[in-house]
Amino acid sequence: MHIEIAERLHPFSHLPGTRCLLPKSNWQLHIFPTLVCLKDKDELKIILDLVGPVKNFTVEQDLEKGHVSVFGKTAEGFLRYRLMQSEKAVEIHFEKLPNGTMHIDLPSGKILVKENQIQRICASLPCALDVPPENLSLGMHRSQDWEMVSRRGDLREILPIWFRLGQLLPSVASEKYAGTALILDQCRKLIENSTKEEVYAAFVNLFLAGFQGILAPRLIDDQYQGLVFSNAPVPQELSPLILLTEGQKLIRALFFQENEEMLTLLPCLPPEFHAGRLLGIKRSNGDRIAIEWTKKLLRRVIWHSATEQTLQLSLQKSLHSFRMRRSLKDKGERISCGKPLVFHPGETIYLDQFQK
């Protein structure tokens, strides 16, 4: 029994002036055909000496490989480069250039670059990931053209990308919320109270007010949509990245929550998410868990135990029992919901046949 996700996360945009985050860094990118701006506390500009128009201009944020690719066809030939966070710096890799060479203006001055050349842009502290990111799918497999995704506004498309991107950024937290982060706090309270009928609309409001471009966060809704009901100033020390880093934790809490004695599956599942999968869940003790649900009910769980433990599962109220197997050849036994389960280190447990 396997639970897999075939969808690959690589949102893209054809809009000149696309904003997006550079994975594994603090940098927000603002990308035009002949200009790239990198902004954190400071702003750096890279000017590309190109002849337009640039046809099929595309900015692609690859969340599988952790970089941003830019490509298109200029009046003189094809262009393709990618920006990525290396161990100590942000780098730009020139993979295809019109005529094989191009001048660029960096903060250090104008230089000539060639195809297959790597240029360091600035020093940067990367976001170190010691484990593979968790994966979420909500059953949508449409094209990830972000202008169309934003127009549809379907969280089944948006949340898996939001969830992955939030894991690929340096952790940001705050005890005080302001601006669009007030909606983030509203989402948190709804999840804590298990108000699953209202949490979907709250996340939609947070998406509309808190992001521009390809999930580039903002604390001030400069589109004035009437979604933030506070005129209090936004503290300068509050980072907009909190919408992604704390947001991905809240997305996770819709489907998985734990404490020392209890583990809860699908604790605040919005009715709109009738089917989905969450893979690679890592518990604080090292356990790895994969879950799948369909028709709004839990369907399968695969549990790789790291320690000797006795744990109680909290499942959806409508479920009363399930089958537990310690191998795929095992016929298993039927377990009543609420009964403590015993796990041994290094073994894999299979839970299925959940019944009302």
Image (cartoon, helix red, strand yellow):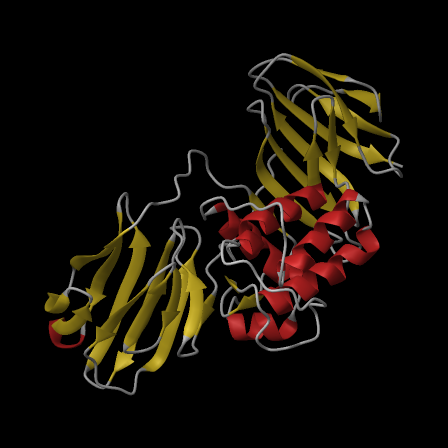
Q: In the image, is 78 to the left or to the right of 160?
A: left
Residue 129, located in which quarter of the rendered image? Answer: top left
Image quadrant in which you'd find residue 96: bottom left
Up/down of 79 relative to 291, above or below: below
Answer with left or right where residue 285 lies relative to residue 185.
left
Name the foreground residue: 25 vs 100.
25
Q: Position of residue 320 (x, y in %)?
A: 88, 31
Quadrant where the C terminus lies?
Answer: top right
Quarter of the image where the N terminus is located: top right
In terms of image quadrants, where is residue 108? bottom left
Q: Residue at x 77, y 45 (%)?
A: 268
Identify which residue is drawn at 60% across, 21% down.
305
The x and y percentages for residue 195 are 82, 50
Q: Residue at x 57, y 50 (%)?
A: 163
Locate residue 76, reporting x and y percent. 18, 83
| Residue 269 seen from this side | no
Q: Is residue 341 above or below residue 214?
A: above
Which residue occupies the foreground of this view, 270 or 327? 270
Residue 189, given in percent of the width and then of the height, sits at 76, 48
Q: Nearer the viewer, residue 339 or 20?
A: 20
Q: Is residue 292 visible?
A: yes
**Number of marks in the rendered image:** 0
Q: Is residue 124 above or below residue 327?
A: below
Is residue 253 left or right of 15 when viewed as pictured?
right
